[in-house]
Image (cartoon, coloured by chain):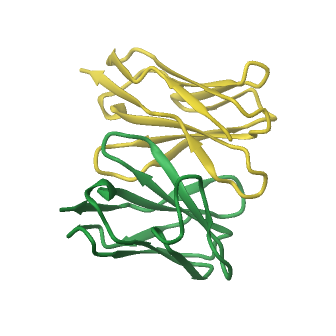
Amino acid sequence: GENVEQHPSTLSVQEGDSAVIKCTYSDSASNYFPWYKQELGKRPQLIIDIRSNVGEKKDQRIAVTLNKTAKHFSLHITETQPEDSAVYFCAASNRGSARQLTFGSGTQLTVLP
Amino acid sequence: SAVISQKPSRDICQRGTSLTIQCQVDSQVTMMFWYRQQPGQSLTLIATANQGSEATYESGFVIDKFPISRPNLTFSTLTVSNMSPEDSSIYLCSAWTGKYEQYFGPGTRLTVT
């Protein structure tokens, strides 16, 4: 089955700096890659996603890039703010119409004021 | 997007007992899923709740331990049976609306003593 690896497990940045989180996947059939943000005690919230027919997608301060050849995708957050502090999970979906998600292990992002 | 609610939000149960968790979506959805998130860990898919048929379980999860129902397109239940302390976790349901995005409920925090 699919295996998703995520790095780093923890990341601390100064407010205003950029943060990058990287994930690799194993199944070349995966075609959908969402990113979720989970604040302490809250549900995972979808913040951005990318499909396999697109190389990059941007939404304000957040961007995701996908390299299908290398089977990796990355989350980029620019101009970080303290409210960006949370655990971020990448995921991959490779089940055709079934849409089950395989998650990475998560990255604890801390933005220092 | 879909609005998802879960009941109960948390519970403390004795070992050997069972707990049924309810998941309600505000609109008809194509697929519903159940995940487990152990403390400080990532999300692991338990099963896909199929409307009108038996759930599809992932490796390591069995129907006798985690029976699932999905009587209609907006509702599902997960039962955690014959509980042990190792079942202490957060259980989340999610819904896929038929496009790409998958949304999560707020989770049920289960503690087994």
Q: In which quarter of the image is the N terminus of chain B?
A: bottom right
Viewer-side residue, A9 vs B104: A9
Camera sees residue B48: yes
As drawn, is B27 to the left or to the right of B13? right
Residue at 31% over, 25% down: A110
Give the colour chain B carries in the figure: green
Camera sees residue B25: no
Count of numbered circles on the image: 0
Residue A17 position by quadrant: top left
Q: Residue A46: percent from the left, percent from the top?
A: 52, 47
Residue at 32% over, 34% down: A83
Viewer-side residue, A69 vs A56: A69
As drawn, is A22 to the left or to the right of A11? right
Q: In which quarter of the image is the C terminus of chain B?
A: bottom left
Viewer-side residue, B15 vs A63: B15
Give the colour chain A carries in the figure: yellow
Q: Residue B100: percent from the left, percent from the top?
A: 69, 52
Residue at 47% over, 68% down: B66
As drawn, is B14 to the left or to the right of A88? left
| In the depicted structure, whether residue A72 falls above or below residue A92 | above
Residue at 28% over, 75% down: B17
As drawn, is A59 to the left or to the right of A11? right
Q: Residue B61: percent from the left, percent from the top?
A: 52, 58
| In the depicted structure, whether residue A12 falls above or below residue A58 | above
Residue B106 position by quadrant: bottom left
